[in-house]
Image (cartoon, grey):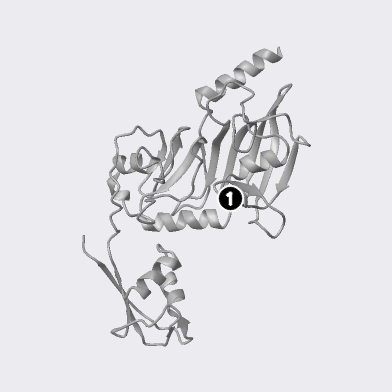
Amino acid sequence: MTDRIETFPFTDETPERLDKFLVRVLPEFSRARLQGLVSDGFVSVDGQPAKKSGQMLEAGAVIEVRIPPPVPSGLVGEDIPLDIVFENDDLLVVNKPAGMVVHPAAGHATGTLVHAVLGYDPEIEGIGGEERPGVVHRLDKETSGLIVLAKNERAHRWLQDQFRLRRVEKTYLALVDGAPPTPAGRVEAAIGRDPSRRKQMAVLPEGKGREAVSEYKTHESFTNHTLLEFHPHTGRTHQIRLHCAFLGCPIVGDMVYGRKKPTLQIDRHFLHAAKLKIILPNEKEPRLFEAPLPEELERVLEELRMGER
């Protein structure tokens, strides 16, 4: 693959920062990616390498951008079955099983969702970054359900913006021990790195962590458990798990933030990304994608229902 070269004349009478102009004419790339091209010498103004991203452009300037092909990730695709809910030229919506890590990390060099997607479509390699091709958002290893992956840079930028601007509606189902203080409610509890256990996250005092907001409502009640429907408005790491624990009703099977021994027979935590509502690139109306509860979670609910009779 060869470098892509784009040339743009700057015709505005009002001077503008180079990076702002590049975001405007190359909307498929993030500002950070474009700033990186400037600092790496891939952008010239009037035939001279751009000095910095904040360089001011004057009317009549000609900007040339050389865009190298995606950096090979070095990851090798694997023949792992995928439950594809939706696919078009821009993205994939996948129903991820519990037990699968989204992208390679320490202790998970193979068998991840990224490896499976690269095995299915090698062209995704390098999209959105070398280490996490196509990844826009994440699910915990033991959380099942819907996740979207971009198939090109333009879609990656679009999807990132949808999540960043909080235009994506996510619905999770969580079975918890006990019940929350009210049948429905809103949780505003900041989340950050646990100061005493650095590999974990924690609810922190105001001003110490990042804003984290969730809304919930009761989906089904049992004697000692409650099935909750959660709608996170922010996307902090382990947000729903922490907010459930904060409410005094930790997720069944969550042995990190909940009880050390599961109260029901389950080999994972009971958290499932059931619905995803999002506007796709080049579309105006949002689409709703759904993933049914996996069999192992549905079986837990059926046993609870039978015990209530």
Tell me: residue 35, above or below residue 300. Answer: below
Residue 37 rendering spot, x and y as whole percentages: 35, 71
The one of 267 and 157 positioned closer to us in this rendering: 267
Numbered circles on residues, count: 1
Residue 194, horizontal then vertical, whole percent: 61, 50
The percent coordinates of residue 221 (x first, y second) are: 71, 25
Disc 1: CA contacts within 10 A as few (<14), some (14-19) or many (>=20): some
Quick one: quadrant of the C terminus? top right
Question: What element does badge 1 sit on?
Answer: loop
Q: Tell me which corner region of the image, top left, top right, bottom left or bottom right, holds residue 307.
A: top right
| Residue type highlighted by circle 1 | Arg
Q: Residue at the front extreme?
A: 196
Image quadrant occupied by the N terminus: bottom left
Residue 213 position (above or below residue 110)? below
Q: Is residue 38 left or right of residue 165?
A: left
Residue 18 figure quarter:
bottom left
Can residue 127 be seen by looking at this rendering? Answer: yes
Q: Is residue 295 left or right of residue 51?
A: right
- The residue under label 1 is 236
Q: Residue at x 35, y 32 (%)?
A: 81
Q: Residue at x 64, y 24 (%)?
A: 263
Q: Nearer the viewer, residue 211 or 43?
A: 211
Q: Is residue 18 above or below residue 164?
A: below
Where residue 9 appears, as percent x and y from the top left, is 35, 80
Residue at the (65%, 18%) spot, across then down: 304
Q: Residue furthest left?
A: 1
